[in-house]
Image: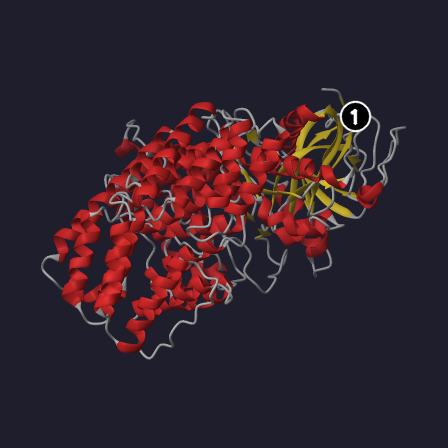
Amino acid sequence: MAHDDTTQILPAGAPAAHASTTPALHGPDASRAFAVTTPVGLGTSEALALAGRYRLAGLLGSGGMGTVYRVRDLELDEDVALKVLHREILAAPDVLARFRQEVKLARRVTHQNVARVFDIGEHEGLKFLTMELVEGESLAARIAARGPLPVAEVLRLARGLCDGLAAAHAADVVHRDLKPENVLITPDGRPVITDFGVARSLEAGAARTLGRPIGTPAYMAPEQVEGAKDLDGRADLYALGALLYEALTGRPAWPGDSIFAVAAARLTQPPPNVRDARPEVPEPVAAVVLRCMARHREERFLTAGAVAVALAAASAVQGARETQPYLSPLGLDRPAPAPPPAEKSVAVLPFRNAGAPDDAYIADGLTEDLIDSLSMVSGLKVRSRGAVTAFAAALDAREAGRRLDVQVVVEGSVRRLGDKLRVNARLVSVADGFQLWAKRFDSRVHDMLDVNDEAAEAIAAALTADRQGPARKAPTDPEAFDIYLRARALMRNHWLTNYAEAIALLEQALARAPEDAAILSAYALARARGAFLGGAEGAHGLQLARQAAERAVERGPELGDPWVALANVRFNVGDPAGAVRALVRAVHNAPSLADAQDLLGRIFVEVDLLDEGIARLERTEWLEPGRRLTRSDLIRAHALRGDWDRVAALIPELGPEAGEWRLVQRRLSIWRGQRDLEPLELPAHVDPLVHQFGHVLNEAITSGALSAASRERFTALIEAADPHSRARRLFQQIRTELLVYVGDTEAGALAFEAAVREGLLDLAWTDRCPLLAPLRAMPRFAPLRDLVAQRAAAVVDAWQTSLALA
């Protein structure tokens, strides 16, 4: 493959600094053609240098104050970190003064456990700050990857943090935003505190309050939440305690996304004890953490040095013993792990076809494959194809990125010239318009996917993310690839039985590319979902799905899709632990794979890890908006948690035109025992299965009873399902609900027993569904519930064990 490198780091829309003689693009892509530059690579001396001195080399992250880049200091010939203040907040009162104050304050602190601040500068109206570049991972990333850390490791990190805080406080600087994301751990294990972005001076009259709390809610001291003007170093000690709690338990001390949600708990409740979540933590260690998080600052340690002394005493009790990462034997009585920290988020806008209309499938294929390739990059959150489709005609990449809520966007164009392809692509920072990477590729048509391999590598490097293993390879046969893409589109958002057409298309694709892992994965997934209803054809479909999934895993073990397909097969045949093991592999290989996050979320909800399940489902919605099945599962999870206000807010978003979603609403109303409900009005085009459920549900609502005919209809549905299928267990659950709702508690108990006998996993429904209260009062309920709990515990154990091995 021949190609020309055309990298240039420029603000989006800026003219090229070095024009080449390469012909400009024409036709439908002309309005968004790329500025073509002389061949230069990312990091060469030709690239734009901020303030004539700092050459961009990659994105490190972004926050409320600005975006942080890795840059090369051309004057000193070394890499540093550079934070660009967001342009839109420059107009706010005192922001620029605060920015200058940040430099003055932070430069006072010189310590091995504090990242040094160097200078302040300006580039074309943008203010920036240069800082020491610390190589390593954040504490947040380590906790997300490994869960609760060994006690001895946490103690070592804590002592280094205490030393860094002591140096800062000695210079009269309070950090005010200490959190795991702002602690970097070097390869030799040294913790370094970064980003004194909201620090304020303790010197009298040196700063004044902004009239609102500044910091991250989960780590803010109570007095900081209340907007106290006389903050001192004990606010940082509170944050240190919250940070240590999270490192030891794997979850935040005060979960919540807003200041108000978090403040309500911490102002009315005592701080949580580490030993309640992890009993093997030594009492002296837990006592230090508790005292750091005392509600009143007078009850905390006076200085960071005092915390260090207490930790030294705790270390003496702990000794040299290295504890293993904490794994609960059951997990069901433990809080769910914290969701991963915010990764770098990216959207690949639909590549524009600059050639003949008949070549549009090439642009679609490149877009789809690049999204899948980037989804395999650890540390990236990648918007799905479905999320970006609406921006196919957008003229402004940054505006599309803002609407998609991402940090960077990739945009590209494709033109076919005979058997040749010309592909242009670039990576743009949404916050400030900097072009982080750009390239023009010239290749043969049958090598077009090699372009994506190289592009994914370069984009991952520009985002300072690790791309592990080879990129996902889409089918090399163009017609098979086109058929595969159409089948995937059909599989999105379809209800239960509408998979026949997708299956037929995928069989056509397999005839052309029988060993392709991507096609095999999609075929297995379609077969597994299409076989949901069970029966003889369903059992045959699941057998075909298993065979295809296992072949896909053999041919692409480094990919995510084959493991998702295998997980769906296992889950449908009653092997949820095996499904979770496959899903852990899928998420490890492709963290942004929406199908993997979605199924994990549903399983976590069933085993009563509601917080983790909701987090996964919400992540799925972010990755791929519009998945109504995901929204339905999310609503159900909030209902099981008893958050009916949230349920009421989410249900309208399902869409009133879809009859199956009205069924969801009525079902939840029945959970709460509501009477005087209006019968369902189901459109004629709704799925036949939904019609059958809707008919029985309407009878229960209008008459308060179930006729013999309705009971027989339910029996027929259940018996038609394969004995091992998930559909059969779900139907038994719904039958249990309706029988209890109409007052036939005994028949409801028998239906519940049948569900348990056939493999019921849904512990959250068993324990939390308000409609089942009469069953829970029965003596025979407890042993059945314990059996469901044992199955759920096995799933949690499989998940935790798989995480430890990943």
Tell whether 93 sits left or right of 239.
Answer: right
Is residue 117 visible in the rendered image? The answer is: no
Q: Nearer the viewer, residue 534 or 731?
A: 534
The image quarter containing residue 37 is top right
Q: Quadrant of the N terminus?
A: top right
- Counting the numbered discs, the total is 1
Tell whether 517 sits left or right of 268.
Answer: right
Q: Quadrant of the C terminus?
A: top left
Residue shown at 34% from the left, 70% from the top:
669
Q: Nearer the viewer, residue 789 or 344?
A: 789
* Residue type, numbered disc 1: Val
Residue 173 image position (x, y, % from top left): 56, 47
Tell whether 167 sits left or right of 566.
Answer: right
Q: How is the image coloured?
A: secondary structure
Q: Residues within 10 Å of mark 1 (few under 14, many from 20)?
A: some
Please, which residue is most extreme toward the top here? 1
Tell whether 195 sits left or right of 26.
Answer: left
Residue 47 image position (x, y, % from top left): 79, 30
The image quarter containing residue 327 is top left
Residue shown at 46% from the left, 46% from the top:
499
Residue shown at 33% from the left, 71% from the top:
698
Q: Nearer the viewer, residue 243 or 532?
A: 532
Is residue 188 visible in the rendered image? The answer is: yes
- Residue beneath disc 1: 40
In the rendered image of this protein, does residue 484 appear above or below residue 339? above
Q: Nearer the viewer, residue 276 or 621?
A: 621
Residue 524 image position (x, y, % from top left): 43, 36
Residue 708 image position (x, y, % from top left): 21, 67
Please, which residue is most extreme toward the left here? 779
Please, which residue is most extreme toward the right here? 21
Q: Secondary structure at mark 1?
A: loop
